[in-house]
Amino acid sequence: MKRFLPWLCVLLMISASNVSAKIDAAQVAIVINLNDVDSLLTAEYYQRKRGIAETNLIKIRLPVGKDAIDEKEFRKVYQQIKKQTPGSVQYYALAWSRPYRVACMSITSAVAFGFDKSYCAKGCKPTRRSAYYNSDSEQPYNDLNIRPAMMLAGSSLEQVYAMIDRGVAADGSMTGSNRSKATAYLMSTTDKARNVRSRRYKIIQEMLAKNINIEQINGNVLKDKKDVMFYFTGRSKVNAIDSNEYLPGAIADHLTSYGGQLFGSGQMSILRWLDAGATASYGTVVEPCAFTQKFPNPGIVIERYTNGESLIQAYWKSVAWPGQGVFVGELMAAPYAQNK
């Protein structure tokens, strides 16, 4: 356990941070798969909703309907992405639902870092650490040569549109007196293998209770809640998620092996969170084993998001080893950001 990240020290460090870094449209590029009609429609919708310039539209061609592409195919596409990316861009929105994996990496990590096998692992082993982890950088490409990416993905085109709408509606919605209307739910489940994040819950609640209402719950199911901003759990399948109401900008995920396999897995896909009303989720695309570093650290997500960072910043910064994990959601959502 000594080689694992000392999570208590991490939480102490982030509490001293005063970063409030809502991103703007000039910093975001939309990557479009010209072979995919839904990708074209998603990109057009997102561009219009977020006011993203034509110069920040990147057009590539990927196979349609495939969950994964190989390293060789990705490298060709990646060079096209880099060539078309304006210098002002710090983040990518990937406007498709498939493919979500590049060989042993998730597609969001492959686009962010470039394909690199050090971000992969065969069996239960660590992977390369992200330089963006718990960073105060507001310009990750300029500072770290990383452009974090998030998929605008969903179980249907209509669900993608709805997720985008929730993200847009989130902006500034939790400032002032509205902050008291949101809750972070930290579930401690009976699934011992997947409940590994629960050891952090007590210190998270102690240190971040001033930022947001936090409830630690011992149980496998959360039902009929009207105020969900965060929902973190560890299960292969989470029941009754659609009985809850998720506030615009809500983040929810379940630590399990294959939540990031968006289609056809025997475990619950992270897309189910978006179907239920969340605005973003995260899951691994290949077997990660129960390393907490391969999953979001709830304390970092909550602290940074409630201090005003945009969704892609807070979520990406919370994963130390993100190479095997895919991020899905409306990346510009910023419910706690003050309007500039």
Image (cartoon, grey):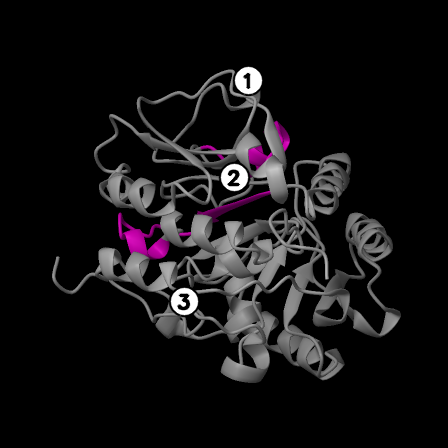
Q: CA distance from mark 1 to mark 2?
A: 16 Å
Indicate the secondary structure of the residue bearing disc 3. Answer: loop
Q: Amino acid at mark 3?
A: Tyr
Q: Which residue is drawn at the image coordinates 23% and 56% (left, top)?
A: 8
Work out whether mark 3 precedes mark 2 in sequence or the reverse, and give the earlier one. 3
Indicate the secondary structure of the residue bearing disc 1. Answer: helix
From which residue to which does the magenta span run? Answer: 268-294
Task: Please name the residue that numbered disc 3 is placed on.
Answer: 133
Where is residue 144 shown, x and y percent of the image?
50, 81
Say whether residue 203 is visible.
yes
Number of numbered callouts drawn = 3
Q: Amino acid at mark 1?
A: Ser
Work out whether mark 1 precedes mark 2 in sequence or the reverse, and give the earlier one. 1
Residues 240 and 171: in front is 171
Where is residue 209 shown, x and y percent of the image?
38, 40
Q: Quadrant of the C terminus?
A: bottom right
Left or right for 275, reference 234? right
Q: Quadrant of the N terminus?
A: bottom left
Q: Tell me, yes or no, whether the two marked residues, 1 and 3, touch with CB atoms within 8 Å.
A: no
Q: Is residue 149 above or below residue 266?
A: below
Residues 138 and 188: in front is 138
Work out whether mark 1 precedes mark 3 in sequence or the reverse, and give the earlier one. 3
Task: Please name the residue that numbered disc 1 is placed on.
Answer: 243
Task: Please name the residue that numbered disc 2 is placed on.
Answer: 270
Where is residue 249 shown, x and y percent of the image?
62, 42
Residues 85 and 35: in front is 85
Q: Which residue is drawn at the image coordinates 68% and 47% (left, top)?
A: 172
**Per the image, is 83 magenta?**
no
Q: Which residue is drawn at the image coordinates 36% and 73% (left, top)?
A: 118
Q: Nearer the viewer, mark 1 or mark 2?
A: 1
Q: Which residue is drawn at the image coordinates 71% and 78% (left, top)?
A: 80
Left or right for 259, reference 34? left
